[in-house]
């Protein structure tokens, strides 16, 4: 919301965003892939470890370059960091970058004439895709922090995925729990997102029902005559 | 939603669906019964074990035959698998088939003149019936996976039902938790459904309240005159 | 909802209900008090134990008498059991009777001219009162089932109240969990109610926000002129 | 809601409230700071311990003085305690005082001409700020009660913050759980607030979606013509 380009945004800035959106989304998926290989591959599995590190570094440099170009094009100077604070956060935590997929969808949609899915279907699709991406990223990060910690209950990547499932749905059995400070910070972020996803699913269902009801109401003749 | 027959669906296809809906629902309940007997009966309890296996196999063949007939009648060819992907999933996971009961209800309803229940009552009834069927199926599947596993906390079918209750309501005490990979996959599905049920209950309550409020508002004369 | 008296209900039936509503609510609170004393008093604490048992028995006889009178007055015969199934359930599980307080409120309200609270305040007040009564009753019933069971984690009434809190809010730490079959049945009921309460709170908040927003929207002149 | 000044409130009372709102909010933050230092500093860390105690005492006296002045100005006499019961609760539990920040925001907003944020942004901002303040206060209070208790699982302030996160989001793993009566009372309050926050997030999301949909609906020409 706070990230929407307003009418005063320079045209070159907007054109840059439209052109780079899809390639940058691809780069963010590559980043996720590189991070996954680095975390999941055994420590002595050269050359995969080295290649993954190179991929992570290279994609991050691409993100940094894009950030600098947009800072220049925006004509905002230092205020860019504050106005586009979400971009700044995503630059520092590139694992969150794939969540920009909603903007990719919008960018792709603008080239077509009309959206193919209803609003509710779009919200539910986006919530589902977000849950998958977030859960996978969080499972990777928590596995990275936890798997070698003392007294950890998350020892394999399977445990980490299971933990992400029970956390995102706010079930929280407690059989797999992060014990390190880093793991708990990641977990707190995932819990907050779980709450937001719950709100999205509940909210879209609720509005859909309300709309269905209103239509049924209009079809029927009013009781009083 | 994506499963609604559109106007371009051949008439023969629609007529087939209307005629087979109720018998197929009966078959899906027989499938559930057969699966329950197979899972819950002691391993040496012949002839029940053999009979249950035969029932499961026969009903699944009925589902497969229906799928093939509808693939032919639809006139979609290979695209049928993609367009009706929900049917494809249900063919591979027949335990989910009883959830089609909402379509059975609609089919039965069309023969009568007007629905007997309001929209809210229908949503709440369907959510309740779904919760019961899903919980029972998931408890069966998890008990099947877990009861002989090493270090399992779900050892009896009572434990499995208790686990399904605390999972569907997202309470998640953690005293009964699946430990096998298969059990955890079933559990993840049940958690996602628990979230959706929560959304359904919250959403219908919310729209009901809004409607009540709107009516009360209309009865009262406006404040300003 | 299904319990609302329709226009075809005999006048004597409706008059009986209006007159007995408040005294019967008092009797249901006495039943709760008697049950609480019976469960919480030490086993050798005569005469309290005997008195509490007498109170429970006497109030239940009052409920049964009311049920029989209403069955006669309704003129429905055997169908009364099915039409007023909620009353039948409450007769068998009298601990749920205090939840009828919403009807007491309505009965008291009808004597006054207009409601003192807005719809949202009423929903939140009722949800809060329901949560308190349900939590207290469930804590009593679970303590009754669990406190002497082998391997129980709910050993004092304080533990039972704490368990009711974490269950109604769907937090579910798992430090206090019922282990007997009876305790688990009570717990499943409480979980389902927790879900409904969550729906009520969320739903009323959601509709309240929507109403506030609509009013703000109407105050502002439309953008397009 | 019940705290809104009505038209019959004396002018002097309203003027007092408008003038003292912002300074009192500062005092409530000082109270929180003093309490945090008192709880978190080691017991022999003089002079911090003494200073923090003095700060807590002084700010509480300011709150008490404000309460007495408002009781006098309101012209309600003893009824003030009942009518403004929320103020009475906050006087006895001053840790809840920072939550009045919504009134501070309104007070600041009235001096400007129009709000800077939309209703949804305001609800989400307030829910987020409330969650942070509540979580921090509850973590302090629970750490205070628990850290020296026998058999406690909350031993460091980090554990207490982690516990507050999993409680507010209703995840509830159960790896950190209060065991003292005082800690459980604080926890029950936090759980209830977690439920309300969930309602706020879900509700605002739901109404936002409904509004977006209504606008989209108005743009499109109606199907029937």
Image (tube, coloured by chain):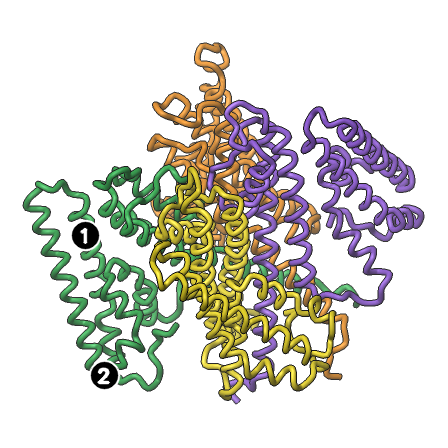
Chain colours: A purple, B yellow, C green, D orange
Of D64 and B215, which appears nearest the observer? B215
Rendering coords of residue B15 (x, y %): 61, 85
Q: Is residue C211 visible?
A: no
Left or right: where B1 falls relative to B94: right
Residue at the disc numbered 1 = C35
Q: Residue at 25% of width from left, 48% of height from top?
A: C140
* For discs 2 and 1, the disc positioned in front in the rendered view: 2
Where is C74 relative to B175, above or below? below
* Image quadrant where residue C218 sits: bottom right
Where is B55 relative to C186, above or below? below
Q: Residue at 30% of width from left, 64% of height from top?
A: C100
Helix, strand or loop at label 2? It is loop
Residue at the disc numbered 2 = C77
Rendering coords of residue B98 (x, y %): 49, 68
Of B119 and A156, which appears nearest the observer? A156
Which chain is indicated by disc 1? Answer: C
Rendering coords of residue C14 (x, y %): 27, 79
| Rendered image: mark on residue C187 | none
Q: Is residue B14 visible?
A: yes
For the view shown, which residue lies furthest in the left direction? C47
Binning the other alpha carbons within 10 Å of mark 1 as few (below 14), some (14 to 19) or many (20 upward) gives many
Q: CA distance from mark 2 to mark 1?
A: 32 Å
Where is D106 relative to D174, above or below? below
Q: Earlier in the sequence, mark 2 or mark 1?
A: 1
């Amino acid at each position: 919301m706070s990230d929407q380009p307003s009418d005063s945004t320079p045209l070159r800035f907007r054109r840059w965003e439209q052109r780079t959106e899809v390639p940058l989304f691809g780069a963010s998926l590559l980043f996720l892939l590189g991070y996954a290989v680095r975390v999941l591959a055994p420590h002595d599995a050269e050359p995969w470890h080295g290649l993954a590190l190179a991929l992570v570094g290279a994609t991050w440099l691409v993100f940094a370059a894009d950030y600098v170009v947009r800072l220049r094009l925006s004509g905002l100077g230092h205020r860019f960091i504050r106005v586009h604070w979400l971009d700044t956060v995503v630059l520092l935590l590139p694992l969150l970058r794939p969540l920009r997929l909603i903007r990719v969808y919008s960018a792709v949609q603008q080239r077509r004439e009309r959206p193919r899915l209803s609003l509710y279907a779009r919200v539910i699709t986006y919530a589902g895709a977000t849950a998958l991406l977030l859960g996978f990223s969080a499972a990777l990060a928590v596995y990275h922090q936890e798997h070698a910690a003392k007294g950890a209950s998350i020892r394999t990547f399977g445990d980490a995925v299971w933990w992400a499932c029970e956390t995102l749905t706010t079930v929280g059995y407690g059989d797999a729990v992060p014990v390190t400070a880093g793991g708990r910070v990641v977990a707190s972020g995932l819990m907050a997102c779980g709450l937001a996803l719950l709100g999205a699913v509940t909210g879209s269902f609720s509005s859909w029902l309300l709309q269905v009801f209103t239509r049924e109401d209009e079809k029927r003749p009013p009781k009083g005559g």
